[in-house]
Image: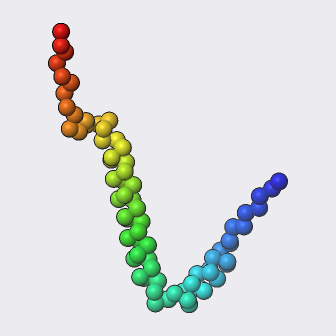
Amino acid sequence: MEILAWMPGPWEIAIIAVIALLLFGKRLPEIGKSLGKGIVEFKKGLSDVQNEVTRPVDEPKDRTPDPPAQG
């Protein structure tokens, strides 16, 4: 079974861009700004998760020493 994927050409992309500009012309800067903020927050959260996962490997935090051996 073949899976056919439609990839828009340059004319289709231009037509879609013109339609988007007509529909969302005044709101495009706001949409771009909120999209950029969302991407920044996502990357920040991803970085925090990565730091949380790698921290125990790099530096043990609040590790209590083992009690002395009895005997």
Looking at this view, is 66 or 45 the one in front? 66
Q: Position of residue 17 (x, y in %)?
A: 58, 81
Q: Position of residue 65 (x, y in %)?
A: 19, 27
Q: Where's the C terminus, which quadrant?
A: top left
The image's colouring method is: rainbow
Q: Is residue 27 left or right of residue 50?
A: right
Q: Is residue 71 left or right of residue 58?
A: left
Q: Position of residue 44 (x, y in %)?
A: 35, 59
Looking at this view, is 53 or 43 the one in front? 53
Q: Where's the N terminus, which quadrant?
A: bottom right
Extreme front residue here?
Answer: 71
- The answer to whether residue 68 is above or below residue 15 is above
Which residue shows up at 22% across the image and 34% down it?
A: 63
Q: Is residue 61 left or right of residue 57?
A: left
Which residue shows up at 23% across the image and 39% down it?
A: 61
Q: Is residue 5 left or right of residue 46?
A: right
Which residue shows up at 34% across the image and 41% down it?
A: 54
Extreme right residue here?
Answer: 1
Residue 41, quarter of the rendered image = bottom left
Q: Position of residue 60 (x, y in %)?
A: 25, 36
